[in-house]
Amino acid sequence: MKLKVLSLLVCAFGFLFVSSAVAQDVTVSGTVVAADDGEPLPGVTVMLQGTNRGTATGPDGTYELTAPSDGVLRFSFVGYVQQEIPINGRSTIDVEMETDVAELGDVVVTGYGEYSSRNFTGSVSQVGSDDFEDIPVTSIDQAMEGSITGANISASSGTPGAVQDVRIRGISSINAGTSPLYVIDGVPVVSGDDNVASDATSSFGLMATLSPSDIKSITVLKDAASTAPYGARGSNGVIVIQTKSGSAGDVTYTVDIKRGWSNRAVEGPGAMNAQQWAEWSAEAYQNAGVNVSPDAFWDQEGTGTDWGDVVTNDNAVTQQYNLSAQGGNEQTQFYVSGGLFEQAGAYIGSELDRYSGKFNFNHQFDERVTFTNNFTGSFVEQDGVLEGAGYFGSPVLAEYFIPPTSEAFNEDGSPKIENFGTSIFNPVYTQKNDIDRKRNSRVINNSTLDIQILENLSFTSNFSLDYILTEEKYYDNLNYGDGADIGGAVDDIINRNLNYVWRNNLNYVFQPREDHVFDVRLISESQKNHAYYMEAYGERVAYENLYNLNTTASPQFVGGSTEDWAVQSFTGLVNYTFNDKFITDLSLRREGNSRFSEEQRWGTFWSVGAGYILSEEEFIQNIDWLSYLKLRASYGVTGNADIGLNNYQRLVGFGAYNGRPNIQLEQLGNPDLTWEKANSLDIALEFELIDRIDGSVTFFRKDSRDLLFDIPLSRTTAHDSQVINGGELYNQGFEMELSANIINTRDISWNLGGNLTLIKNEVTKLPLDLNGDPVELTTGTRYRGVEGYAVDSWYMREWAGVDPDNGDPLWYMDDGNGGRTTTNTYNEADRYYQGANAQPNQFGGINTRINVYGFYAQANLSFSFDYKIYDNWAFYMRSDGRVAGAFGQYETALDYWTPENTDAQNPKPIAGGNNNAYNTSSRYLYDGDHVRLKSLNVGYNIPTQYLENVGLKSATVYFTGRNLWTHMFDDELQYDPEQKADGFTDLSAQPMRTLTFGVKANF
Amino acid sequence: MKNIIKYLLVLLVVAGVSSGCESFVSPSVDQNKPTETVIQSTDDLQAVVNGGYDYLNDVDLYGRDFYVSGDVMSDNAFSNGNSGRFVTQDQMIFTVNSGYAEGAWEHFYQAIGTANLALGAELEGDGVEAIKGEAYALRAFSHMNLLLAFGQQYVSGGDASQGVPYVTTYADSDEFAPSRDAIADVWANIEADLNSAAQRLDSGSFNSTSLNYWAVRALQTRFYLYTEQYDEVIPIAEEIINSGNFSVTPAGELVATWGSGEGPESLFEIAFIDTDALGTDNIARIYRPTNYGDVEVSEDLYNAHASDDVRLDLYGVPGDTVETLLGDVEIDSYRMLGKYTDETGSDNVRVIRYAEVILNYAEAIAAGGSGAQETAFQALSRLTDERYTGSSPYTAPVSVDDVLAERRLELAMEGHRLYDLIRTGRDIPLGDSESYRASTGGALNYGTYRAALPIPDSEIRANSNISQNEGYE
């Protein structure tokens, strides 16, 4: 019986097939226009569904093709909603394409699934490729600066490829990691500079391996509801990156060429010139009772040197070439790209070259099974410089330290090889002849099998590999510089990192009754990371420019190690929508992490979220000007396991004594060690007014607890500390976003938006040491962790200026009666909280885009307030004579006390120093408050009528500027206000200003 | 429907494979081993003791700082401050944050930690006792140095209860915050541990780079001399002398033997081979005219040598040209060149030599120790016969002062001078007016609190049971 039914069915379908085969072919034509302005749309793909037959609309928006009279035509174009229209025997089909507003913004990409933002209760911010693809960023995280509410982003250094310090909603930890988790196409990847062994030279951020051109969107997950699925990796926020993929239709090629020029964004404090320095040095000696004239410091034979000029590149070139193609048919779509990016840094000898390729494709095997594979490969070479501390070979240091009376070059133009009286090396020679290089090869492959088991039940299995190989080479030449007294040296380091993630995801959507929609996901995820490191170091290089280990005569060091970590988790997510009005999100995650002992290995994390779309209610719908209003809240527990490996174990290490093996005591361990945890509350109101203004206001509070601390131990234990969970802190604040379409006509539009974040951070509890006292972390400059203060609050002696009577330095001290008085004795001065920490407490951005016919202009202004930065090398460069005649000085040191100039910034210079004036104090602490034009982008979309003859679909020429303008509110601050997250200037390469011209064409 | 079943099967397989197995989240420990189970064999036990020696060869201890400071903090040497090193030791003005004090405190207790780990091992078999003997010696030796550096025994107004914690366990959380043991108790514990060591070690084997039987016997002579138990010094010294195993290096070979990086007549020295070398922090770089070169010999010490003293050849004097890695350098000061010859750091650091045993023996006799086979003069002549081309400057009967004068010359730049001065109740004179100490008062009288280091602030903060030394509160 069954068979008969089956055969009947076959017959029936067979008939259908036959009948379709005999349907008449007709010629269909029509015009495709944009729905919003009625303009014809060229380049729209028109496909006969189920076949590879198709065409594209011409410059006037018209098309014509032959198709069966009962066929279905599919119209698709990037940025517009795809339409499927049955022919039904018609010969003319005109189509209006609606702008695809859902493409971005209305879909939340969490990495674990995509949700309609309307039906999501978490707190996220997104930027799309439009916002950053014209801007020549080295690293994709730079693209978020000023655009992501709640995220503070600063470069750890201005060297191309350096790590970006990203802090989302404040600093959530004192001793564990504070950087967010990065997720690419749904899979957690390795980030930061984890794959680099040496930190004397420029850092290398792994995000610089990705070509921004291949990225479609960046989503930042901030609250418990959105990050809880990431369990113990979510406390610092999650950055979800989605790469571009293809869509069905004719192949579209895109060429993007940029060329730009970089200089320092802020010129910096500058150094005294030779004449000034010689006079200043002489005066310092005279004030110390040594009668010398400026001639003693400068024979005036040469012209002296502006070392700032010598160590920096003028208009360092940036160039980028990117070619991509995307297209496909019903079953298979692809996106493929290749790119070349070269950027020279602002300092001599610093450069980044990136070669990248991408191949994303997906193929539908049958109606149930889809396979997707995303592949990214890159090779990046970073030539760095010694920076971040007082390295003698650092060009950043040389700018200020080498006396300006010296000459950088010989008469024949070659760099001078001498010690300039300071043992600091001529950076022109060392940058040319030494190597500080990192070469990074990275492959990320991400394969997904998606099985639509039932209409509402799907299963997805995803396996992703992230393979990173970093080769570091540090070569000191044998003639001059760091290598001179050891006959040259070669240090070769190889770091290999393999990270793989296997995730299985079961998604079930069911609707028990109308108005009730459940979206349930069960996810298991296994992640493992294997790292391998090997280093060899040899001295006595055989010959100039031979820089491999085989050419060193004296091997000094070999080392190698392997380590791994693993995370396994089981997660359940439920999204429930009632009546399209009430939404709840629940998540529960059980996670095992290899960083903890067996007893502590498994933890549970959870979140609940609720949303209420008030504008669905009648009483709101009656308010004309309010088109959308949603209230949402979430609460949950996330974790932070970003700590060293195997910290819980009591371990010994191995070495050698006298050529025989030895065993030494490595760590005491703590079997009770567990995650840092954070309880996050998030309450937000989202709204849209008069269909033109949308925005949101969010309150958040994140209570971090079980913070890791090293409890100091009596050294008689043979250890200095033990790591325990103890402290507590919180971050709390508001986030506001607003975007207004002020003008919105066919030819002219103007959008203005902004975001603002207010944050308060406070340490509320510290663990107790063995004596029962709180373990306060106070350094020479700040409270790292002290109850009642923000993490890294500046705390130091407070500068009271220069004594107008005698040029002495003055500091404040308690007067014993509850007030303050001044003293010229450094050791009498008291230390005070300086009213700020190193992270801005108020920051945000203002952005605008104006389209006028084919022209557009886009600007992004960022601002940061209420933080301070400390110039921790000013004690040399504003030394008040301490290093007179030895090291160069800031130009600002010229404003010093004399009997005539009593209202000076700097004390009277005295050789050997004036009363410890150089010592750590708020004298070198500056307000970082600033406003900066992060990017300005002006372009012109060339009208299509000029392009058709040359075979282009579209073309844009544009100009962009990055960091074009900066205003600092502290008149005394000369450095760039954007410093690394810890707030120290640290002789790091300064951020760059880049001007770029670009051309982009589709064909 | 069939397809659905197929997919469900795939699903089940996948779910089965990926469901939690504990081993997936167990970390590899590839460079380390759990402390509790690491000692499985005598080789492991020996490796732990080697680990203790390796702490001693840290730059903070015998690698350089502790060893060199014994001379810089005396009339033997001073710092020229060329690279800013040893200036505080020269001045003898320490703060509770002194890196020198902290390094010495921390690393000696690490060596003690390894000794205690070894001593706590439950292991039987050949050689176990001998290795444990080394561990006892390491523990005694480290505590003795801590006591000399931090104890209040030579400080006026010093409290007899203010020795140092004598630690005999590792990783016992009940003992994590010990208080200071009384000075007498520390001495008694050192004595007991040295005895335990001597009982376990084999007098038939000798290796100068580990704490061997003869080294322990020699340390016992030092111990009993320091604690003024002269009667105890004599028989042990005579056992060493009469064993026939050791002899004083002949005058003609002395400079060359020092130059070889080992000996002369070392009973125990800390080994430095290429893989242990301390790079630019090595001891030769601080004595020789390198880019460090901070420690110079006082003219006073140089002049204390008689003109026929063969040891004069170990010094460089103003005007000499010295071959260094950076080329030839003409020096303008007195320097100890002959004892530390290798700027790449492969000179062993001599901890106790046969010469010291003879000096200990002679001093014990001169100080009134009974039962000796020889007079102090005869004992001292065993050494001086090989140090002067003519006759020695001493005549019978030699006094304690004579022995100490010879001791200063023989053990110069071997870390003894400060302790020889203070243990005998002498002032600490200024060897040279160029010394930084000249600007801070010059000579220090016996009993000065500055002869003892402050207990590091980091220790006091972590352990409230420890009290600070006189003068540093």
Image (tube, coloured by chain):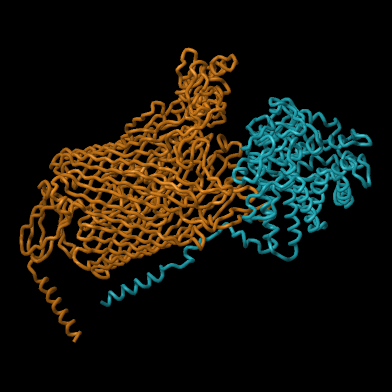
Q: Is residue B115 above or below residue B227?
A: below
Q: How many tags in the picture?
A: 0
Q: Nearer the viewer, residue B14 or A391?
A: B14
Give coordinates of residue A781: x percent, y percent. Answer: 50, 35
Q: Is residue A565 above or below residue B428?
A: below
Give coordinates of residue A77: x percent, y percent. Answer: 18, 53
- Is residue B159 found left or right of A475 in the rendered image? right
- Tell me which chain appears orange: A
- Tell me which chain appears cyan: B
Q: Which residue is pictured at 58% across the width and 23% down the height?
A: A912
Quadrant that contains the N terminus of chain A: bottom left
Q: Residue furthest front?
A: A817
Q: Residue furthest bottom?
A: A1
Q: Nearer the viewer, residue B237 or A612?
A: A612
Figure quadrant of residue A142: top left
Figure quadrant of residue B448: top right
- Is residue B415 found left or right of A194 in the rendered image? right
Q: Nearer the viewer, residue B332 or A117?
A: A117
- Is residue B469 found left or right of A134 in the rendered image? right
Q: Is residue A786 visible?
A: yes
Q: Residue furthest top?
A: A900
- Is residue B301 found left or right of B327 in the rendered image? right
